Amino acid sequence: MRTTPRISTLRLFIYIGLLLSFSIQLSAANIVEPNKEFFELGNGLKVVLKPDKSMKLVSISSAFKFGAAHDVKGKDGLAHFTFMVADRVIKNTYASAYATILEKSGTSYTPEFGRETAIFTTTCTAEDIPSVLSLEAERMSINLFDPAEFDAVKRLKMSEFIKGTYDELLFKLHNVVIKMPLVTNWEYFHIFAGIQRDIQIARIQDIERFLTRYYSASNAALVIRGPIDPVALRKTIEEKFSILPVSNLFPLENLSFTVGPIPRWYGYPDLRLKFPAIVFTYPITPITHKDYPALMVLNHLLFEGKASFLGEYAVKSNSVLEYYTDMSDYRGANYLGAIFTIRDAAYNDILTDRVKTETERISTGKFSNNTLSVAKKAALKKFTDSLKNYEYTPNMSRLALILETPANINKLYDNLNKVTKAEVMEAAKLYLAENNRHIIYCDINIK
């Protein structure tokens, strides 16, 4: 007599666990839901609405696909100059409106400028949403401005060159990494602040050209997150922004990544340092490049977190006092790297050799699949966390601008989840090569 085979209780639990795991992966990958959370106006403005009742305030980011990479050759720094103008003009012209919005507890306003994007984020109460949206619509309509404002921004920018604006060691070192002539023949590098001469000879027409071309709805993304009603808010957005005109934009060049040969070491004296510091920086590609997911995993394998090879080493070493890592497009360049504050200068060569050893370990595949899995999970967590916490709106507006569609945003997560050991090894061989590594040693005693 034939009977139906029985499924053991253990096997049933395994099946259920696999199904739950699969459904969790699907929901995690669906970072932005098309049509429901993402829509695009007729003039090209991309909008993401994320209801979040756990938030007391509303976060609103308007982002423009405009950064240091849009500078005209021979006029470096004008994009950043334009960003300062766009920020200053709106705040000065509508000072009373901003004062009303920002007088409440917890509210804030933060402008950010990078290689490819300029982002303006306001945290406000739900009742102030219409006012903030009106201000952002005004920002997308700037064409001309008072010459006195132009002169005021020029004076402010020149003062930055003279006295410097970043006093903290971290920002100081980042500034050194980008400003020194280490990566000037690298295609993805752009001078963030320009040089004094470029700013001195800047004309008001140069800035107005940037404003009219790039600060428009056609070149922008708007992201709102918080205790919102997305249906009602969509109507408000359509009323305020649909009337804005379409602009003729000039897209960025589609560059290919190339490596050296270029200078790789620079000594930088700083009288304010209590201890020596050493910076390792590797230029990488933007987020749209096919290698970027592997680079995200590579960063967590080598640099990011205590479980990484260099992170673990830094924690155990008595000679490493502080350790900081980064992977971003900070100040006009895409890069990954680390900053070590060390006890004494004698440790410089030892640490450099250690970085070389760990780099070779990755490029030759001398790490387990379990180690890769840990790094991949850490990369996935950091990516999703950046779209959950207080940084959500600027990060999402950047993704919406650069990746353009919900499908591409979700695909980045999927591609990150699919990164293989072979892809990480290939990325290490290309991007962690010695002729793509820049070392800056900072110490009070360097002459």
Image (spheres, rainbow, N blue to C red):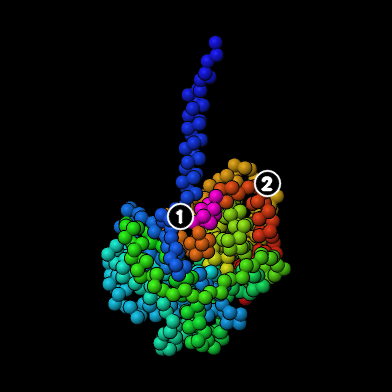
Q: Quadrant of the C terminus?
A: bottom right
Indicate whether residue 168 is drawn in magenta. no
Disc marking residue 366: 2
Residue closest to the eye, 236 or 409: 236
Q: Which stretch is magenta? A: 406-414
Disc 1 is placed on an element classified as loop
Residue 173 at what x, y percent from top left?
A: 54, 69
* Residue under pointer 1: 34
Q: Residue at x 47, y 50 (%)?
A: 30
Q: Amino acid at mark 1?
A: Pro
Q: Residue at x 35, y 58 (%)?
A: 230
Q: Residue at x 32, y 78 (%)?
A: 95
**Visible residue check, residue 60:** yes
Disc 2 is placed on an element classified as loop
Q: CA distance from mark 2 to mark 1?
A: 41 Å
Disc marking residue 321: none
Q: Nearer the viewer, mark 2 or mark 1?
A: 1
